[in-house]
Image: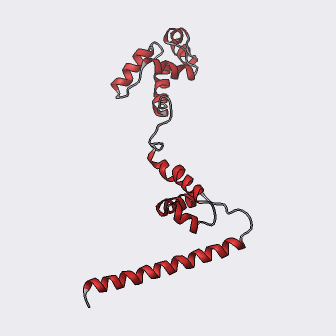
């Protein structure tokens, strides 16, 4: 037997078997659909799976096979769920400046409390020496958030520990 005839015979039987399997599954789905009362609830994962396959089939084939929803709905799911992965939404960052690390914030507060005469610039410079990049304005915002006044006002106030140590 010629290899071309052999290949044609094999692919023909495979195609016939696939067609019969598909016909069986379509019939089974229609029977099950008639037994189910009400609307079938689908998860986004199920919608995505149906939309992906439905898009590959095309609208004509979907009109023959789709029983749960209309072909237009399946194609709309494809536009919304499958094509959504290409819009860059997963790579977008949240708006605004990223939050300051809590460890760095605690360090700013500690430096301000231990060195009452240091201003925002000096604290920022000391942090730069430690390898942190932070602006003097950010240092000021952190200290305001923690209720710590600016350097001139901090210098005027004395803690009990300092008062007892002095006297």
Task: Establish if 93 lies above or below 159.
Answer: below
* Drawn side of residue 34 relative to residue 94, left or right: right
* Drawn side of residue 33 relative to residue 95, left or right: right
At which x and y percent is residue 143? Answer: 52, 20
Front position in the image: 58 or 133: 58
At which x and y percent is residue 39? Answer: 70, 62
At which x and y percent is residue 66? Answer: 59, 66
Q: Quadrant of residue 163?
A: top right
What is the quadrant of the N terminus in the image? Answer: bottom left
Front position in the image: 16 or 44: 16
What is the quadrant of the C terminus in the image? Answer: top right
Q: Quadrant of residue 28?
A: bottom right
Residue drawn at point x = 49 percent, y = 48 percent: 84
Task: Establish if 162 lies above or below 62.
Answer: above
Q: How is the image coloured?
A: secondary structure
Residue furthest to the left: 2
Task: Establish if 163 lies above or below 27.
Answer: above
At which x and y percent is residue 52? Answer: 49, 59
Residue furthest to the bottom: 1
Front position in the image: 37 or 30: 30
Residue drawn at point x = 54 percent, y = 9 percent: 153
């Amino acid at each position: 037997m010629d290899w071309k005839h052999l290949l044609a015979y094999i692919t023909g039987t495979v195609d016939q078997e696939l067609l019969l399997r598909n016909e069986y599954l379509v019939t089974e789905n229609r029977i099950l659909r008639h037994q189910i009362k009400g609307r079938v609830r689908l998860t986004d994962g199920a919608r995505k799976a149906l939309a992906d396959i439905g898009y590959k089939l095309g609208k004509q084939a979907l009109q023959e096979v789709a029983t749960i929803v209309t072909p237009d709905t399946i194609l709309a799911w494809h536009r919304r769920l499958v094509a959504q992965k290409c819009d860059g939404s997963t790579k977008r960052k949240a708006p605004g400046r990223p939050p300051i690390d809590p460890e760095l914030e605690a360090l700013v507060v500690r430096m301000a409390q231990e060195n009452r005469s240091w201003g925002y610039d000096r604290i920022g410079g000391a942090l730069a020496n430690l390898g942190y990049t932070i602006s003097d304005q950010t240092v000021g915002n952190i200290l305001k958030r923690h209720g710590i006044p600016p350097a001139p006002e901090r210098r005027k106030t004395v803690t009990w520990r300092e008062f007892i140590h002095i006297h």
